[in-house]
């Protein structure tokens, strides 16, 4: 009977002493004179299956020639394993080579550096580390859908191609169908009327504006899709293409928003702890010691809520010499984030930020100086989510747009939402990769994206 | 107690004769001398709630001035309704205006043409039709995730930005961070080495190539994300941005693939029938008569499997004068698709297509003339999915790439998958919007995408 490794692990009792057929790949092959051991993996679960064979097999010599990486089909009997740390193994009866693999196959059963594996992005999910990372990525994505769908949010596919000046058009990739080597020029400028859309279009850095339009129809919506930034920045946490989750909720203020963020994050972490037990165990052992405990602690903790002003107070009183001096009118630095999450020993919502360092569409507080924005700081990962109550007053919104130099003509429809039954509403954004870095302990964003795009790097 | 309309409908017995608070929008407002009726909708479900008030209310006169579109909060008692067709209504006790709306609000309680509403894309989800369409879109998206996740597929976020010549680079949008008005030129050509990635990059038309790499690690994977085509085509079924689902399965041949396609589609249709009862009923009454029956029939039907050759045989024998003459070496036309699905009175898998009209990566059959490709034709929607067994032979694949003019240097890694433990494998693509057209009866792709992008149209 043809079965997946996952099923064999889950229903071992049913298959014990039975003959099964499995299809997958050789991860390792240890050969002895009269025996052989194949570490087999078919990708359906993290664990390998040990296949044993001996020289009673007709094809013993050919089998011994099989390289790491080969695709094989094996018929054999599931038997109790005498080896330590595994309940069962498969005693090979028949084997068929389905796809050969040369000896110079780049993924060998030894420790490869993450830098080397980044260069082999199309092969690296075959390694333990990346297999675990990208399976967890899939499970975490499902957790997010489950949370929002079970709470009656509508999933909106906001457009990637846009002409709206969402977050500053200088941060967006331009797209075109024109021949760059022969652009149609008029008066020294490109005649964009001849492009497919008749004007300059971009791929977007946020779905928020479009999300708000749908929140005004469905009350609760979320987006979950790819997002682009042109930032020419080579850090561990920046990529030019990444995935974002952007919920938007009508009739919701800043406190309501924090309730949602906290509940959602706890749901996702619990879901991953439950559905990725083996992977979390692996990360805990080999990537970040204490990871499991960190995640379990988050689920049972109560997140602190404190204003930016009060955070700066704490930082100023701190007996630490920071590189950057904390300031009531400025953003807080990474070192400050770290101090604050350690100070409270858990996740911290920082609210009411100086308006000049935040986006134009955030609601100005009564003090006229701060906005009803909130960042969630998480121990070990820094800022995980950023959100705000949105400015619902049409005149105030327009005036902020002008102050911040936003091209009004491209967002007039967005501003109109305030005229047509606008109401108090809030939303947040969560970078999916930042969540994954937190969940896996893997530190570099390049290692949680299947095929990462960073400045100068767009292979595959 | 503050509640959503959805909860009120689902737990009506618990709330009957109780006081509740609701927040939402006025869809319609009928005023009489001593009474008033507000059709209220908060977006959490398709149905409106009727709110009644009379002149015993202190603010009777102000309430009567409220326009369609206003955001309101109402406190009132849930009571049995004397009106036909509704079980309950809310007797208003207090009302608060949360967001005003002028009289010239474009969405009035009358029939608007779909063309007009396309121009109001940011407001149209507030209408019955589009509210139903985009809620169903969200539910159908969840159905797809549920199907694949519950069958242990790994969800892979394949990159949108790519340098690989997946489906012909002339069909892809170029992206750039360079200033188009001042491009750096060298020898009459743009110096792309100065662009962010150091070369020309595109936004992609498929995730399949990258998906195959992950199928060789996980056995079963799927993608679900936005996709782009530059096609300058103004038809009901073409858009420049749309969403695709692309599963890829290792150790799976063409028959196995058809099993998966059939099971998946039936699952999604059943899921939508179950979770969008009201919306399906609405589409059945106002968009496509017989829709519900069509969908229920699909779930219980057995899909026909027939080769392209045999389909052409049937078409040639048909007593119909087709505009296009059916030909063994050519694609079949829309009129042929229609005839065949009517002939079999149900969905039809057409297999083994002439190789020259199909993609370069499809497996050549033993006859050397056809490829192991399959299109699923569905009554009333035409081609819903297209898939194939992939060419697993390295030499044959390279030779097909050359014949079809693919830039080999950009897909060498993809071809290498055949060298490193490649195995027989298959995959398919389903355009999400085509599925939605089938599920809703709405005929134009512009009406199932929140903010559609078509040639000359990129508003919002």
Image: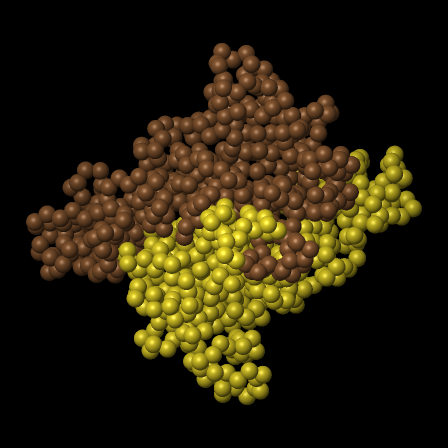
Chain colours: A yellow, B brown
Image x and y of residue A317, in percent: 49, 87
Say which residue appears at 34% left-offset and 54% top-offset: A216
| The N terminus of chain B, quarter of image | bottom left
Residue A183 x, y percent position in the rendering: 56, 51
Q: Nearer the viewer, residue A422 or B74?
A: A422
Identity of the residue drawn at 15% across and 41% down: B82
- Does residue B289 appear left or right of residue A10 in this picture? left
The foreground one among B335 and B154 is B335
Determine the residue positioned at 31% across, 33% down. Answer: B286
Q: How many marks?
A: 0
Q: Identify the residue at horizontal 24%, vertical 59% (top origin).
A: B100
- In the rendered image, residue A134, in percent from the top left (x then y), is placed at 63, 53
Horizontally, is B305 left or right of A91 in the view? left
Q: Residue furthest right?
A: A33
Above or below: residue A279 compared with residue B133: below
Name the image quarter holding residue B190: bottom right
Q: Between residues B423 and B173, which one lies in front from this camera angle?
A: B173
- Vertical placement of B48 versus A211: above or below? above
In this orientation, does residue B299 appear?
yes
Residue A140 or residue A89, whichever sits in front: A140
- Where residue B177 sits in the image (x, y, percent)? 57, 59
For the question of whether residue B390 can be seen, the reply is no
Quarter residue B65 falls in: bottom left
């Amino acid at each position: 009977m043809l079965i997946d490794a996952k099923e064999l692990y889950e229903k071992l009792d049913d298959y014990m002493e039975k003959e099964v057929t499995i299809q997958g790949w050789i991860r390792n092959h240890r050969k002895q004179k009269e025996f052989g051991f194949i570490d087999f993996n078919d990708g359906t679960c993290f664990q390998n299956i040990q296949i044993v064979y001996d020289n009673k097999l007709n094809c013993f010599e050919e089998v011994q020639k099989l390289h790491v990486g080969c695709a094989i089909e094996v018929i054999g009997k599931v038997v109790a394993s005498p080896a330590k740390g595994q309940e069962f193994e498969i005693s090979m009866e028949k084997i068929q080579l389905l796809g050969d693999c040369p000896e110079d196959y780049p993924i060998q059963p030894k420790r490869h550096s993450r830098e080397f594996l980044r260069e082999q992005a199309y092969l690296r999910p075959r390694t333990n580390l990346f297999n675990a990372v990208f399976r967890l990525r899939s499970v975490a994505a499902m957790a997010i859908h489950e949370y929002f769908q079970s709470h009656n949010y509508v999933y909106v596919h906001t457009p990637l191609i846009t002409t709206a000046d969402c977050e500053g058009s200088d941060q967006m990739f331009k797209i075109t169908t024109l021949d760059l080597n022969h652009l149609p020029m008029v008066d020294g400028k490109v005649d964009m009327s001849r492009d497919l859309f008749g004007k300059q279009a971009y791929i977007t850095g946020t779905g928020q504006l479009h999300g708000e339009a749908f929140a005004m129809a469905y009350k609760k919506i979320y987006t979950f899709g790819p997002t682009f930034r042109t930032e020419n920045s080579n850090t561990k946490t920046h990529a030019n293409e990444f995935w974002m989750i952007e919920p938007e909720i009508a009739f919701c203020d800043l406190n309501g928003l924090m309730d949602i963020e906290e509940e959602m994050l706890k749901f996702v972490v619990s879901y991953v702890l439950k559905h990725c037990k083996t992977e979390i165990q692996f990360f805990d052992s080999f990537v970040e010691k204490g990871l499991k405990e960190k995640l379990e602690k988050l689920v049972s903790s109560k997140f602190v809520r404190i204003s930016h002003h009060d955070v700066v107070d704490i930082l100023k009183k701190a007996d630490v010499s920071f590189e950057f001096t904390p300031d009531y009118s400025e953003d807080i630095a990474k070192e400050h984030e770290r101090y604050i999450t350690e100070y409270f020993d858990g996740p911290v919502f920082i609210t009411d930020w100086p308006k000049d360092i935040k986006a134009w569409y955030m609601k100005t507080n009564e003090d006229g100086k701060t906005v009803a924005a909130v960042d969630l700081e998480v121990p070990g990962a820094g800022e995980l989510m950023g959100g705000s109550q949105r400015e619902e007053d049409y005149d105030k919104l327009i005036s902020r747009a002008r102050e911040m130099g936003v091209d009004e003509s491209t967002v007039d429809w967005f501003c109109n939402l305030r005229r047509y039954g606008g109401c108090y509403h809030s939303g947040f954004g969560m970078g999916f990769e930042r969540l994954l870095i937190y969940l896996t302990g893997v530190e570099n964003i390049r290692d949680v994206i299947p095929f990462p795009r960073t400045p100068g790097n767009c292979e595959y």
